[in-house]
Amino acid sequence: MNEAKIRATLKSKGLSYTRPRKEILHLLMTRHGPFSVDDILKSIPDGTCDQATVYRCISQFLEKSLIKEVRLGEDFSRYEFNNPDHHHHHVICKSCQKIDSIDNCFIAPFLNQIKNLGYTEIEHALEFFAICPKCQKA
Amino acid sequence: MNEAKIRATLKSKGLSYTRPRKEILHLLMTRHGPFSVDDILKSIPDGTCDQATVYRCISQFLEKSLIKEVRLGEDFSRYEFNNPDHHHHHVICKSCQKIDSIDNCFIAPFLNQIKNLGYTEIEHALEFFAICPKCQKA
DNA sequence: TTATTTATGCAAATGACTTGCAAAAATTGG
DNA sequence: CCAATTTTTGCAAGTCATTTGCATAAATAA
């Protein structure tokens, strides 16, 4: 992932190219999330930016649909790059908090039912909480 | 819903019968939620109890599985009575925040997939965000 | 480059939720 | 039913993720 790609992505959403935006978007585009704000702060080069700036970048990225918010029953949000070709959900281990991706999405029957109620622009949030194989042994 | 029923429900979970617990559980058992802590405070008789007590009752009810927590993309939690015979999900209108119930749950295919990954004790959170018929007209 | 707009850092504020502690209510053992 | 003990509550202060005000710095426009 080179700077040109990052810059182009930002520009395409009308966002100027600044160091915090570059580093945060780079992280989100290249590494596997979802990331908390703390994860982001620890993963970008030291001194890149302030925590307030991370929050501000995140809201802008969310507004522009560059990223998605993920809530996994924690008292903070996580964020991941929004790849429309890779719609997926998560399982988080109730014991060790390890997060796995679930790549197939079978919510069509729900959508039909909700459409029949007259709703439009339907989005969904689906997350799973379970005990992972490793924690079952321990 | 009479006091005897409420008292019995509390006792069955090893909780003593106090006024705050009685009023909060009564609300959750008789009225249609999910309720925020603010909703609860406004819906129980005036002077029933402090906000801290509502939070404490809620955590106890959650621990005893008397109620379930529901997150609908707001910056606070909602809670509803846990009726094992009435597993359901919610749609919240992205415009007016009205909440509807979705009574059928079609997540079996997901469960198979997650079981195959070796997970056990699988729970899920599924919520929908959409525009309701009324807000489409307005 | 210079002027203007936009973004950032820092510190303080916000708001949901939690907690310490003394008083009040509930339970227990006569 | 009463006195003793345990549990619960109210109040106020604390916590923690997230937001915001404002002066400075960086980016963009002219």
Image: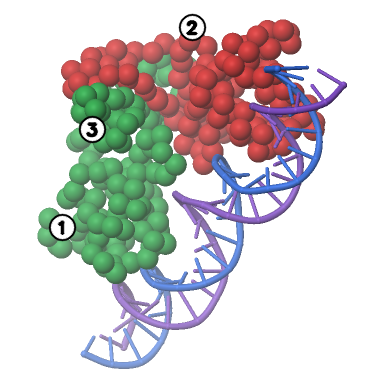
Chain colours: A red, B green, C purple, D blue
Q: Which residue is denoted by mark 2 in the rendering?
A: A85
Q: Are marks 2 and 1 on the same chain?
A: no
The answer for how far apart the CA atoms under marks 2 and 3 are is: 30 Å
Q: Secondary structure at mark 3?
A: strand
Q: Nearer the viewer, mark 2 or mark 1?
A: 2
Q: Is residue D20 left or right of residue B104?
A: right
Residue B103 % position (x, y) = 20, 28
Q: Nearer the viewer, residue A115 or B131?
A: B131
Q: Secondary structure at mark 2?
A: loop
Q: Which residue is denoted by mark 1 in the rendering?
A: B5
Quarter of the figure with the C terminus of chain B: top left
Please state the total of marks drawn on the protein image. Answer: 3
Q: Secondary structure at mark 1?
A: helix
Q: What is the chain letter for disc 2?
A: A
Q: Quadrant of residue D4?
A: bottom left
Q: What is the chain letter for disc 1?
A: B
